[in-house]
């Protein structure tokens, strides 16, 4: 017998591998931590058509269409993306699928890279579809394969929930052979009562869903992955997902019911477990989703109110919370690791834009992307951040509520990827409702915050092919905006004056700040800023640019800039900001390189 090949994989890579082995032919996503790498990994498998979509709703619908056509399809998104995709999610539970459909959602306990800390498990209950939760990479891969079988057997999409820790941690995974015979779509079969959700059909389908949930709960009771591990019976713990690993570490002696299908629950298995242990605890990350359902079965849960509901769990945190019978706060990070605040890269175009905005002094309804960091020091230039695409809409609302009090003093900021994700509807609303807000589009030709993914703006596909990309000016013009200007954000004076003009314009206006993200093409700088200590007066204007390459030093009796030449890219924004001419660009003269002509030859072994 040959040993099965094992690879070290993150949860995200394991999900991609599971999809490949299941014969998935269409996979879609919109980037978002913690799940971005699922589609990136899938794009490397030749049998999978992996696509970035404009947003999560579109991603969901494309995957659903592929499933309707009889293909196996997977869609992945971060937790807040599921809010965007919620509409087709709920209705697709009614239509059912044809080929299997697996919906992977990544929750972010502790909100390390997110605007909220939602627990997406509630979606399974609200939309009435099964949900599975793996505990490590091996199980993540295996569960994708089993989720497709479940999906096709019960004619339903299946939710697979991950959390950041699982998505990014690596454990060994035994890989299997792909089901290549499953890759070709079996074809769409017209079925009016199933796929056309008119009100009469919807009511009929609702009955089918309720029956399906009963069948799924019965299946959960027979499914070996909802397993009881008997140990000492004085304490029994019900748990799921990554919390299972923490429970095993914190209470190695306790009996455990590891739930893998966390909706609908295996009621009989839970009852059997609860009856045979002296004290029953339910330990889960975020909301008491399992606990409430266990209590609804009439079972007493001793740990009610003990488990933290905010922030990521750890074995130590669980142990302390159970010991003290009260939720313990998140432990502060490792004191040996220096705390860091997120910063905009040295020389990024956003530095120029925020410097200009700060000089003008306006209210700014912000959005989500690297530019969100404009809300921090030294600019403090953003007043609201809610969710992707919310900036323009909230600005319209503020304008309508405050009228003349904000006329000419209100700006909505949005990135190119976010504009195409969910900003076009609000922009249309601005025109339709005759608003006067100025919209500043931060066009860096990429989705920078999540790792430079392609989007319809730059035209680059998930497979790396170049496409034409949309013309933002023409698109915005077609929406009905007449006043559109493009600025070079590295020209401080121009940025400031065009923004002032836009704000004064009596009608909706759009300013596009355009310069490619510096990380797209990392070139060596040809010049860098240098300080003349004699000319510097310590006015501090250069610090207002907020560049990480500008550090501080004491000269004479004041604080002056110290340019970190390991970071400076020579953008000249600080040079322009300096009123005294104390900062100036200087060309970089390449060092003389001595070439050693007597290099040893490589030795063949
Ligand atoms: C609904 C939703 N999906 C995905 C994300 C993750 N995310 C945050 S910002 C962003 C896009 C950023 O791109 P862009 O607006 O172009 O700004 P940039 O980072 O390039 O400055 C993404 C995908 C999110 N926060 N919410």
Image: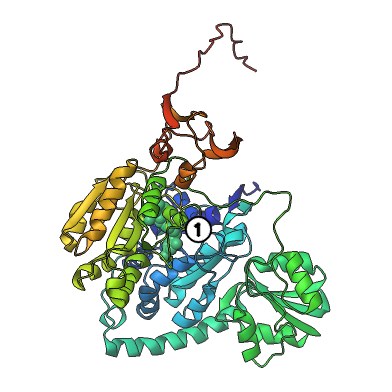
Question: Looking at the image, is 333 positioned above or below residue 130?
Answer: above
Q: Residue at x 50, y 76 (%)?
A: 130
> Is 465 placed left or right of 150 in the picture?
left
Residue 503 picture quarter = bottom left
Residue 59 picture quarter = bottom left
Question: Looking at the image, is 305 positioned above or below residue 152?
Answer: below
> Is 391 placed left or right of 222 in the picture?
left
Q: Say whether residue 136 is visible.
A: yes
232, 268: nearer the viewer: 232
Q: Does the residue labelled 1 lie within 8 Å of ligand 1?
A: yes
192, 586: nearer the viewer: 586
Instruction: From the top left corner, tell me how far across and down residue 549 is, in percent.
Output: 51, 38
Would you name the residue on which mark 1 appears? 33
The residue positioned farthest toward the top in the image shown: 598
502, 395: nearer the viewer: 502
> Is 439 placed left or right of 141 in the picture?
left
Q: In which quarter of the image is ligand 1?
A: bottom left
Question: How many marks can you see?
Answer: 1
Q: Which residue is drawn at 74% across and 78% down?
A: 326
Question: Looking at the image, is 295 positioned above or below residue 528?
Answer: below
Q: Say whether residue 184 is visible.
A: no
Instruction: From the top left corner, tell me how far across and down residue 470 is, in percent.
Output: 24, 51
């Amino acid at each position: 017998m040959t040993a099965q090949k094992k690879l070290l994989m993150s949860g995200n890579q394991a999900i991609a591998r599971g999809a490949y082995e299941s014969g998935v032919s269409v996979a879609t996503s919109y980037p978002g931590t913690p799940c971005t790498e699922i589609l990136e990994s899938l794009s490397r498998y030749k049998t999978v058509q992996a696509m970035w979509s404009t947003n999560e709703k579109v991603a969901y619908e494309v995957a659903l269409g592929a499933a309707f056509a009889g293909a196996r399809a997977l869609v992945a998104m971060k937790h807040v993306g599921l809010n965007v995709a919620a509409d087709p999610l709920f209705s697709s539970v009614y239509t059912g699928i044809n080929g299997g459909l697996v919906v992977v959602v990544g929750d972010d306990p502790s909100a390390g890279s997110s605007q909220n800390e939602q627990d997406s498990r509630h979606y399974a209950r609200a939309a009435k579809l099964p949900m599975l939760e793996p505990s490590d990479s091996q199980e993540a891969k295996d569960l994708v394969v089993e989720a497709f079988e479940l999906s096709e057997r019960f004619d339903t999409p299946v939710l697979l929930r991950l959390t950041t820790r699982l998505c990014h941690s690596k454990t060994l995974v035994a890989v299997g052979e792909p089901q290549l015979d499953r890759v070709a779509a079996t074809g769409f079969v017209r079925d009016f009562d199933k796929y056309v959700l008119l009100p009469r059909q919807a009511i009929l389908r609702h009955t089918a869903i309720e029956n399906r949930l009963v069948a799924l709960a019965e299946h959960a009771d027979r499914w070996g992955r909802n397993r009881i591990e008997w140990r000492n019976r004085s304490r029994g713990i019900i748990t799921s997902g990554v919390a299972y690993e923490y429970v095993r570490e914190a209470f190695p002696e306790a009996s455990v019911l590891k739930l893998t299908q966390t909706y609908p629950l295996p009621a009989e298995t839970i009852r059997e477990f609860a009856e045979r242990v002296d004290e029953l605890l339910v330990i889960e990350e975020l909301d008491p989703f399992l606990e409430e359902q266990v209590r609804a079965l009439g079972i007493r849960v001793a740990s009610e109110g003990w488990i933290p509901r905010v922030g990521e769990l750890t074995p130590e945190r669980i142990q302390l919370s159970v010991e003290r019978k009260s939720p313990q706060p998140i432990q502060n990070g490792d004191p040996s690791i220096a705390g860091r605040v997120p910063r905009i890269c040295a020389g990024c175009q956003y530095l120029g834009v925020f410097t200009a905005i700060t000089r003008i002094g306006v209210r700014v309804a912000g959005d989500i992307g690297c530019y969100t960091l404009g809300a921090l020091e030294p600019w403090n230039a953003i007043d609201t951040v809610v969710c992707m695409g919310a900036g323009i809409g909230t600005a319209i609302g503020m304008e309508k509520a405050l009228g003349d009090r904000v006329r000419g003093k209100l700006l909505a900021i949005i990135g190119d990827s976010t504009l195409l994700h969910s900003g076009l509807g609000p922009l249309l609303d601005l025109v339709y409702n005759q608003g006067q807000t100025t919209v500043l589009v931060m066009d860096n030709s990429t989705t920078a915050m999540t790792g430079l993914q392609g989007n319809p703006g730059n035209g680059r596909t998930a497979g790396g092919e170049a496409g034409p990309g949309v013309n933002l000016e023409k698109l915005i013009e077609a929406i009905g905006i007449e006043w559109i200007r493009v600025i070079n954000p590295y020209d401080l004076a121009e940025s400031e004056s065009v923004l002032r003009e836009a704000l004064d314009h009596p009608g909706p206006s759009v300013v596009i700040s355009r310069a490619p993200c510096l990380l797209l093409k990392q070139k060596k700088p040809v010049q860098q800023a240098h300080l003349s200590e004699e000319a510097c007066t310590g006015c501090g204007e250069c610090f207002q640019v907020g560049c990480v390459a500008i550090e501080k030093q004491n000269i004479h009796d004041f604080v002056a800039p110290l340019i970190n030449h390991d970071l400076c890219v020579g953008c000249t924004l600080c040079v322009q900001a300096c009123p005294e001419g104390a900062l100036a660009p200087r060309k970089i003269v390449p060092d003389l390189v001595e070439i050693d002509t007597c290099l040893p030859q490589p030795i063949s072994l």
